[in-house]
Image (cartoon, rainbow, N blue to C red):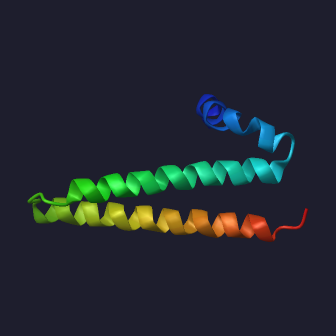
Amino acid sequence: MYPDICYKTLSSYAGTIKTNPRELANAALSVSLKEVQSTSALVQKLSKGRDFRPREAGAIRDCVETIKDSVDDLQQSLAAIKDLKA
């Protein structure tokens, strides 16, 4: 969907990826995982030390939970790639 961002993000891995689709998927998942973990830390930091209305607090909790689910999914995907046969 976003070829420019994809190219910009993954081009530094070209030497490793070459023409290997598994390495491409591995690099894409690894980069995504790193970014989601960074986002998670940021949202958690922003949510601490503030007084939020109940609705806002609920939205932040939902956001944190969704991000944690994303981290889990990405980690499972990385593990699944390792189990694939060449």
Question: What is the x, y in percent for residue 16?
Answer: 79, 43
Relative image position of residue 81 (x, y in whole percent): 75, 64
The image quarter containing residue 41 is bottom left
Q: What residue is rendered at 23% in x and 53% in y?
A: 46
Q: Residue at x 26, y 56 (%)?
A: 45
User: Could you say where residue 64 lies in the image, as x and y percent from the top left?
Assistant: 34, 63
User: Which residue is located at x 49 percent, y 49 percent?
Assistant: 35
Disc tally is 0
| Residue most extreme to the right | 86
Can you say which quadrant of the picture contains the N terminus?
A: top right
Where is 30 relative to 62, above or below?
above
In the image, is 17 to the left or to the right of 33?
right
Classify the position of the C terminus by image quarter. bottom right
Q: Tell me: 9 left or right of 24.
A: left
Residue shown at 31%/55% (left/top)?
Answer: 43
Question: Residue 18 vs residue 5: left or right?
Answer: right
Q: Nearer the viewer, residue 60 or 80?
A: 80
Q: Measured from the top left, where is residue 11 in percent x and y?
A: 69, 33
Quarter-of-image position of residue 82: bottom right
Q: Is 52 in front, or is 32?
A: 32
Seen from the viewer's position, the closer of residues 15 and 24 is 15
In the depicted structure, whether residue 40 falls above or below residue 2: below
Q: In this rendering, is residue 4 above or below 23?
A: above
